[in-house]
Image: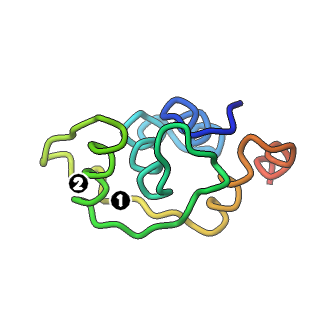
Amino acid sequence: MSSSASASECQWLLRNMGFDRERYNERSALVLLALLGLKPGDPWTESEARLLRTVDIMGWIRDHWEVDYRPNTRETVRRYQVTSEALSLIRSHGTPSFGRNLRR
């Protein structure tokens, strides 16, 4: 596991947090990274729980992850928010305590 943010690592994280296939795809991972305020290579420990409008999420993904979603993607982007429990787990990603936290 890497201690820095990437879309594939975020997909792995979502899958291992118990999300179904629809919610651990690349788009879901990029939305989560935007909500966490993480750019490529940022450490997971810098994760935040940001509240962003859908258009701002899409702009963050375009500007920092170089993926441009069409406006008709908004409905699938709109459904996400980071809980305090998830934020705590994500911040521990890449640390020795991560496995223990994930099992909880």
**Where in the figure is residue 78, as x and y percent of width and height?**
30, 59
**Residue sitting at x 36%, y 38%:** 65
| Drawn side of residue 102 relative to residue 44, left or right | right
Element marked by disc 2: helix
Type of the residue with mark 2: Glu
In which quarter of the view is residue 4 placed?
top right
Crowding near pointer 1: few (<14 within 10 Å), some, many (20+)? few
In depth, the one of 78 and 46 nearer the eye is: 46
Q: Which residue position is annotated with label 1?
A: 79
Q: Residue at x 52, y 66 (%)?
A: 49
Along the viewing direction, whichever of 75 and 38 lies nearer the viewer = 38
Q: Is residue 11 left or right of residue 46?
A: left
- Expressed as whole percent of the image width and height from the top left, the position of residue 19 reads 55, 44
27 above or below 34? above
Residue at left 47%, top 48%?
Answer: 33
Q: Which image quarter is the C terminus in?
A: bottom right
Quadrant of the rendering where the N terminus is positioned? top right
Q: Is residue 83 left or right of residue 34?
A: right
What's under tag 1, amino acid-wise? Arg
Query: SS at mark 1?
Result: loop
Picture residue at 63% right of the left edge, 59% below the top: 86
Q: CA distance from mark 1 to mark 2?
A: 7 Å
Residue 64 pos. (x, y %): 36, 43
> Which quadrant of the figure has residue 95?
top right
User: To which quarter of the image does residue 70 belong?
Assistant: top left
Q: Are marks 1 and 2 in contact (CB under 8 Å)?
A: yes
Query: Which label sits on residue 75?
Result: 2
